[in-house]
Image (tube, rainbow, N blue to C red):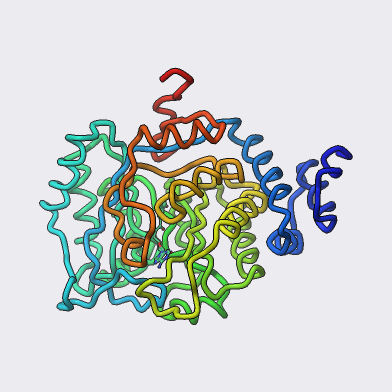
C-alpha cells in the first residue's frame, strides 16, 4: 500500500486509492474527487488494476455490423444530428429486403460476423409489428447471427404505438428473435440536464425500468452515458451510481459504454469536442465506480482508434467491433471512420499490452489471439 501511495501525485486521492486497493465500494464524493483530479496516472493505474481483476489481461472485440433502418424520427433530442422529419431531404427508410441485402453483402466479405446491431429513429408510421418484423426477417435469413436491437426509448415508443405494455413488446421482440438490447438512450439521467438535452425522451428512471424488465425476461443489455455536453462531473457520478444500483438488483447489464459527445450539426452550441484527457478519465472513473459491471467498452467510433487503444490501459476491456456504416456519429462530426478491420483491432489491443479475444455479443469466447497469430 505505502509503495503505491508514494507514487500518487494528488494527495486528495489517498483515501480513494486505499479503498480501491482493498476492494471497497466508492462513494459519490469519491467519484467527484476522481473527476476533479488531474492525476491521470493514478486514476488510470487504479482503473487498469480493477479491469485486470475482472478480466485478466483479456480485451474483447467482435465482428459486427450496424444497421440503421431509418433516420426518420419524431424525437426532439438536441444532441442528435442524425434525425430527419418524414419528407425532409435526406430522410430514408430501408425495406426489409434492403436490410437483408446489406447483411448478405457484408457476410460475403466477413463470414465470421456474429452480431447485427439495429437502432434507428422513432418512425411516425411504425409500431411493434414493423420493428419486430425487421428482427424476425433478419433471424429467418441469418439464424446464427445475434440481433442486438432497439434502445429502451424505441421499445417504449413501439409499445405505445401498438397499445401494449413494455413487457409485452419485449416478449414479442424476443419471440421474433431479439437476442439483447443495446445501451443507447441513456444520455444523462439527471432530470435538470435531461430536460434540456432531450425533453421528450423517457426519464432516466424509465430507461432503467425498461432495462430491468428486459433482464427479468432473460435478456442481457448494455448501458451508456453521453458525456461532454452540458453536464457536470456530479451529473456523471449520479448517472453511474444509478446504473450501479440497478445492476445490484438484476445483474443483467454486460457492458458500460461512455459515449463522447460530438457537437457538429447539433443544437448544443456551447459544446465542443471532448478532449483525450477527459475521455480517458471518464472511462477510468466509470470502471472504478461500476464495480458490478463485468465490462467497460471504449467505443472506437466515437473515441477514435488511438484513444480507444490507450483506454485499454485506463479501465476498458472491450473496443467494440468492426462496425461498418455507423451513421449517428458520422452526422455529428465523427473523426474516426466507419469501419475497422479485425486485423487492426487485434493490433490495437496487442500493442496496448492486452490479449485480443474475439467474442460474441454475450461474451462467449470465439477465439483468443495468442502471440504469433
Ligand atoms: O443513444 C447521439 C448517442 C447513441 C450523438 O450497446 C451521440 O453495444 C455522441 O448507444 N455525439 C447510440 N453521441 C449509440 C449507442 C451504442 C453504440 C455502440 C455500441 C452500443 C452497445 C451502443 O449515440 C444514442 C446517443 O446517446 N449519440 N448523438 C452525438 N452527437
Vertical placement of residue 267 versus 365, above or below: below
Q: Is residue 57 left or right of residue 100?
A: right
Residue at horizontal 55 percent and vertical 31 percent from the top: 354
Name of the residue lying farthest toward the right: 2
Q: Quadrant of the C terminus?
A: top left
Task: Please give the name of the residue rendered at 38% of the width and 53% of the height, measured from the top-left corner.
Answer: 336
Q: Position of residue 355 (x, y in %)?
A: 52, 28
At x 67% / y 41%, what residue is drawn? 50
For this orientation, the residue located farthest to the top is 372
Q: Quadrant of ligand 1?
A: bottom left
Residue 190 drawn at (x, y percent): 58, 73
Estimate the x, y position of residue 322 in percent, counting from the top left.
34, 42
Name the image quarter holding residue 232. bottom right
Return the residue nearer the eye: 185 or 268: 268
Q: Residue furthest left?
A: 97
Circle count: 0
Q: Quadrant of the image for the N terminus?
A: top right
Which residue is more in the foreground, 251 or 43? 43
Q: Residue 80 location, x and y as percent?
A: 37, 71
Residue drawn at x 52%, y 64% is 274
Question: Looking at the rendering, which quadrant does residue 326 occupy?
Answer: bottom left
Task: Say whether residue 288 is left or right of residue 79.
Answer: right
Amino acid at each position: 500500500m505505502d509503495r503505491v501511495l508514494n507514487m500518487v501525485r494528488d494527495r486528495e486521492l489517498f483515501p480513494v486509492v486505499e479503498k480501491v486497493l482493498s476492494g471497497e465500494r466508492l462513494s459519490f464524493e469519491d467519484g467527484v474527487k476522481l473527476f476533479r483530479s488531474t492525476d491521470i496516472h493514478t486514476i488510470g493505474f487504479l482503473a487498469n488494476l480493477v479491469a485486470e481483476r475482472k478480466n485478466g489481461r483479456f480485451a474483447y472485440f467482435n465482428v459486427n455490423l450496424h444497421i440503421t433502418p431509418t433516420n426518420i424520427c419524431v424525437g426532439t433530442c438536441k444532441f442528435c444530428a442524425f434525425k430527419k422529419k418524414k419528407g425532409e431531404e435526406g430522410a430514408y427508410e430501408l425495406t426489409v429486403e434492403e436490410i437483408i441485402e446489406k447483411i448478405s453483402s457484408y457476410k460475403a466479405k466477413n463470414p465470421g460476423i456474429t452480431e447485427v446491431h439495429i437502432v434507428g429513429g422513432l418512425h411516425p408510421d411504425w409500431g411493434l409489428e414493423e420493428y419486430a418484423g425487421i428482427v424476425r426477417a433478419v433471424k429467418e435469413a441469418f439464424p446464427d447471427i445475434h440481433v442486438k436491437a432497439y434502445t429502451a426509448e424505441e421499445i417504449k415508443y413501439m409499445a405505445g404505438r401498438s397499445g401494449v405494455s413494455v413487457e409485452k413488446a419485449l416478449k414479442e421482440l424476443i419471440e421474433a428473435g431479439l437476442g439483447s438490447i443495446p445501451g443507447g438512450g441513456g444520455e444523462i439521467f439527471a432530470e435538470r440536464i435531461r430536460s434540456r438535452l432531450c425533453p421528450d425522451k423517457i426519464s432516466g428512471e424509465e430507461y432503467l425500468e425498461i432495462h430491468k424488465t428486459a433482464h427479468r425476461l432473460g435478456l442481457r443489455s448494455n448501458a451508456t452515458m453521453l458525456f461532454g455536453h452540458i453536464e457536470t462531473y456530479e451529473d456523471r457520478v449520479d448517472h453511474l451510481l444509478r446504473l450501479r444500483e440497478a445492476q445490484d438488483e438484476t445483474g443483467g447489464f454486460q457492458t458500460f459504454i461512455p459515449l463522447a459527445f460530438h457537437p457538429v450539426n447539433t443544437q448544443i452550441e456551447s459544446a465542443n469536442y471532448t478532449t483525450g484527457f477527459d475521455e480517458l478519465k471518464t472511462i477510468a472513473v466509470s470502471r472504478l465506480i461500476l464495480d458490478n459491471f463485468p465490462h467497460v467498452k471504449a467505443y472506437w467510433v466515437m473515441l477514435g482508434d488511438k484513444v480507444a487503444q490507450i483506454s485499454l490501459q485506463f479501465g476498458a476491456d472491450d473496443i467494440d467491433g468492426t462496425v461498418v456504416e455507423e451513421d449517428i456519429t458520422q452526422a455529428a462530426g465523427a473523426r474516426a471512420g466507419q469501419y475497422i478491420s479485425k486485423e487492426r483491432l487485434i493490433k490495437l489491443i496487442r500493442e496496448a499490452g492486452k490479449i485480443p479475444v474475439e467474442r460474441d455479443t454475450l461474451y462467449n469466447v470465439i477465439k483468443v489471439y495468442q502471440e504469433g497469430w
